[in-house]
Amino acid sequence: MKRLTQLFIALIISSTNIIAQNVNTTYFLDNAPMRHTINPAFQPVSEFYLPLPAIGNLNAYLGNNAFTTKNINFNDGFGFVLEDDAYKKLPNFVKLGTDVQFNLISFGWAVEDYGYVHINSTERIEAGGFFPKQLFGSKQNTGLELDPITATAAMFADLAIGYSHRFNDKWTIGAKAKLLLGHGYVSGTLDGLDMQQDDQSIQLNYQGKAVMAGLIHTSLLNGEVEKEQFTSQMWRYLIPSGYGSAFDIGLTYKPINQIQLSAAVVDLGFMKWKDAEYANIAMDTTISSISNYDNIISGINAFNRGLHINNVEKKAYRYMINPKLNIGFDVNLWKNRIGMGIYSQTRFYNSYVSEELTIGAAFKPFNWFNIAASYSFINGNWSNMGAAISLAPYDGIMLTFAADYLPFQHKNVNINNNIIKINNNANIVNLSIGIAVVTGTNSRKWKYKDDDKDGVFNIRDLCPNTPRGAIVDIDGCPIDFDADGVPDNLDKCPNTPIEAYAYIDSEGCPEDLDQDGVYDYLDRCLETPADLAHTVDSFGCPIDTTHQVTLATESADDMDSDKDGILDKDDACPTTYGVPENKGCPQLKQEIRNLLQKSLAGIQFEFDKADIRPESYSLLDKIADVFIQNKNYTIEIQGHTDTSGEYQYNMILSQKRAESVRNYLIEKGVSPDMLTAIGYGPDKPIADNSTKAGRKLNRRVEFQVTYEEVIIKYINDKVEGNQY
């Protein structure tokens, strides 16, 4: 069998795909704040988080797509060998990869009721390469001609700002914008590679093309490199020589409270390197063991002596970075204490696609303690188990550890007389640790609970004890469109008139206590005897069936037609049940008041136009429903502006906006006779026009509601031949 050298091990460590790698098991930890790197729609359960520099969010990845460590026999000396059976199963090209990410500075905080802001800065060292199958062949100590090798490596920082918003109990959407600052880049293709090796050295002969930028440049590779010179070059790492941008976008959807679907595309963008060096390269050299730092420098010098660089050309180099598609499905039981789910991560690298499917389960007994286990299925092969744990006190330090490929089986290998214990059945190592300061963990969790299960989070629920099954408005209160005090889900008479409000039963229907066939709110004789109940007039009073005369003796001065306790002579609305504070006319119910109050800021128009914005339709639809159910309303729709601009223009604009609202309500079925539209321009401010906040309040639409009193006169028809 052919031995692969430690130089090749170094190549594995430093040349892999340009794709940021997250630990998949972290997906199942609800309380891990950096979980938003998987999907920007995910929101931490804490009000605020601040990871520590470096170790606050550290991820390390190393792996390949073809073989596991159990397929490798490590030998003393220079390298290791791959078993024949494993070699036969290799694809034509083997992808090798490594990725290291560590936190520079990151923090995030909750905004208002539903939002979350993230600001993150991360340093990333990533690389990728595709290596021909022949490189893993079985011949030893002989020359080997290989198919082309392609490899890419990059070092860069990303500065990101993201925002996630919960629109309701079902939908959450998030996005993140990233500025990429490149420090070093190299990519190349090696053709006609010929390699001969033994236990102590490797002889290389190849030619190819390369692109280098930033810290990695041709001057570093020309001539002898001393240890001090090699170290001194590192200052160039701090100066960005490449720039780019990327975007993340994601969403979550809960069809029911126990199920969540999520999807996100991350790292969708590009990088551009200024003054990149395009060069032809050739190599003819022998390199000995590189087991320590001094030998690494010696190896670099030997590499340089045999390296020939020519046809160097400087120009900008631009390429797309490689995105990922993350999709998840979760089921949560026992009040979210137990979770199970499936997480799919698809990585795109040029024309290569890598698919990883992970199933997992989580136990979340407390908001500050989550533990999860997972099992992965990579490119058609089952891999190893993963585990994760997150300890987050309500206000304090959060500790997170996650690994996708746990080393349940080990074996000892001897590399240069050093015994190293490694995982015996893994092709990937993927670890993550995090230490962060978190605050407000418990309070934020409560806000996004829905204790009465009405679909409105506690923090927004004005009626937190709504009975099950009730249909609620956006404030979590039962909808009662006829405003009789009985929620629609219990109301068997959903169109009860206002004048009947004081005379309804528990099912929302008008009462008739004396059972004379006339509802109490219309009945002027509420205690008609049972033997006369079948002979009453339209006012519920007994009739002298001999002469067809009402037997009521109530005088006009003592009449209270609407039974609201206010005599008709003092009642501004004598046939409509009302309240003394409103001169006998009905007072708007609190639910309707709240709805109309929202119109002050909730009805939005296109800038400098009278066109109603679509986001206002829902509010106007609810207002229309209230007006349709209460046909005795008369409504003045008032348009108002601030003092910006010319007075006459504002008067015209306010009139047009009021008319737009009137026309919309008419289209929804409100009677035109109920509605008038008047524009008052800037004449009726409710706030200070000298401030931005005040001007915003003054730009509004108001509804002035009054009652149209309809008095019905009943006339006794004269019956021929009767005496009065």
Image (cartoon, helix red, strand yellow):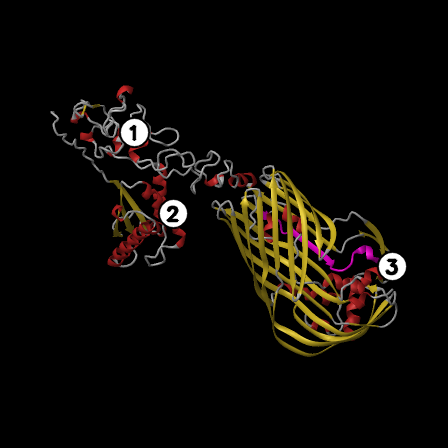
- Residue 68 location (% of width, % of height): 78, 56
Dot 2 alpha-carbon crowd within 10 angstroms: few under 14, some 14 to 19, many 20 or more: some
Q: Is residue 61 visible?
A: yes
Dot 3 alpha-carbon crowd within 10 angstroms: few under 14, some 14 to 19, many 20 or more: some
Q: Please identify the quarter of the rendering in which residue 579 is found.
A: top left
Q: CA distance from mark 1 to mark 2?
A: 34 Å
Identified at 16% across, 27% down, the residue is 556
* Amino acid at the residue labelled 2: Leu
Q: Is residue 518 above or below residue 230?
A: above
Q: Is residue 375 above or below residue 199?
A: above
Q: From the viewer's perspective, is the residue at label 2 or at label 3 nearer?
A: 2
Which image quarter holds the N terminus?
Answer: bottom right
The residue that mark 2 highlights is 619
Front one among 585 and 2? 585
Q: Is residue 273 above or below residue 39?
A: below
Residue 519: image tag: 1
Dot 1 alpha-carbon crowd within 10 angstroms: few under 14, some 14 to 19, many 20 or more: many
- Residue 146 location (% of width, % of height): 79, 72
Return the residue found at the far front.
721
Lateral position of residue 428 relative to residue 714, left or right:
right
Q: Earlier in the sequence, mark 1 or mark 2?
A: 1
Q: Earlier in the sequence, mark 3 or mark 1?
A: 3
Q: Which residues are magenta?
A: 50-74
Q: CA distance from mark 2 to mark 3?
A: 75 Å
Residue 75: image tag: 3
- Residue 670 location (% of width, % of height): 31, 47
Which element carries disc 1, helix, strand or loop? loop
Front one among 147 and 709? 709
Q: CA distance from mark 3 to mark 1?
A: 100 Å
- Labels 2 and 3 touching (C-beta < 8 A): no
Main SS, magenta region, reads: strand
